[in-house]
Image (cartoon, rainbow, N blue to C red):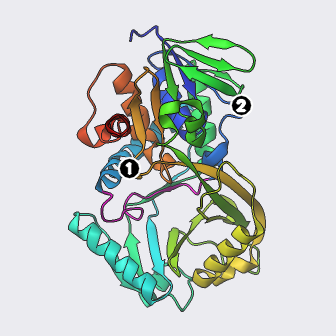
Amino acid sequence: MTSDGRVAVVGGGVIGLSVAWRLSGEYAVTLFDPVPARGASWVAGGMLAPATEAWPGEESALELGEESLRRWPGFAAELRHEASDPGLSTAGTVVAAADRADAEHLEVLAAYLHGAGRHAEIVSGRTLRTMVPGLATSVRRGLSVPGDLAVDTRKLLGSLRAAATRRGCHIVCEEVTEVAADRVVTAAREHTADVVVLAAGARSALLHPQLREAVRPLKGEILRLRARRSSLPPPDVTVRAMVEGRPMYLVPREGGELVLGATQYEAGYDETVTAGGVRDLLERAEQVFPSVVEYELVEAAAALRAASSDTVPLIGRLDDGVYVASGHHRNGLLLAPVTADAVLAQLGGLPVPAHVDAAHPRRYLAGRESA
């Protein structure tokens, strides 16, 4: 496509905004979203943690995540230069195990990471409590992953929107009802384009028939808390934990805030916060960081992750010419740089690395054709 080509990006979360920002340096870009810079990206914890998300059998997801993690410092530096500081943290991550079964889970993860040549160190509960004051005395063991990063999601979204706009991206705050290779339809009118990139998260499945079985919504609830004078301050690092076999994370923010997440379950397109979800999160957090029950509850929110069946996103051209960038599961923030770079390369007819090509949607399309 020539440099004066018109690109329509559908979706204004972290993936859509990152794609729009990258492409706006090369093409005439219009982004469509009724409420840009919100949705699942606004609610997300902000962990950039391919190692602690890894599990045996998910090598493609790990390779893609680590490639994107390598791009994050440069990605953040560009945003800081063009717009504002996205709030990248290099403090690292620790993973805590609350009981014997959780410790065994941690040992499996550590062995897998060591076998894959990744740096992660098993430490005793006592050592972990030295690293993170305030952890519960019941924590049996931990894993230190110094290479993981984190980002302030709301600073990031604001920076991406400002940077894309400054490069000339036009934002249309309308709900999209239909997409095709050369047009985007909203309730107000039809917009023509030379290329359409569908990056609408879980709702991508509602806008394209080839994605109905490839992408599904996974509901997640999170809490935002704030330390009070009577409580311990938040940890300096991201704390992940397995509590009775269920994951939990605590991500520190400026001003004594703490993001606590996240539930994960199938609930269709329901985005309401449930009392049970709030209770479960607080109970899990208290078992790992007891002082959390003294914190002020600032916000409870829910959103929909866009999940693929194999934990690898879909990045590439569909049969009808529409490009897709969706299905990022829990790793939309982590994978934003590599996704945006991949879409830019694909539109320019350039090759992408093998671990990026593994995310091409042809793997779903081929399976459907065989069936």
Q: Mark 1 points at which residue?
A: 69
Which of the pair 102/267 is nearer the observer? 267
CB under 8 Å between discs 2 and 1: no
Region of the chain picked out in magenta, as a range: 44-58
Q: Name the quadrant of the N terminus.
A: top left
Residue 352: x and y in percent read: 28, 32
Q: Is residue 71 magenta?
A: no
Up-down relation of residue 369 to residue 279 (above or below): above
Q: Mark 2 points at which residue?
A: 34
Magenta region, main secondary structure: loop
Res. 352 in view: yes
Report whether 221 appears left or right of 363.
right
Residue 146: x and y in percent read: 38, 66
**Earlier-in-chain disc, 2 versus 1:** 2
C-alpha gap between disc 2 and disc 1: 30 Å
Element marked by disc 1: helix
Element marked by disc 2: loop
Badge 2, how many Cα within 10 Å: few under 14, some, many 20+?
some
Image quarter of residue 159 = top right
Q: Please report the residue visible at 76 percent of the width from the left and 81 percent of the height from the top.
A: 230
Up-down relation of residue 244 to residue 51 (above or below): below
Report whether 145 appears left or right of 111.
right
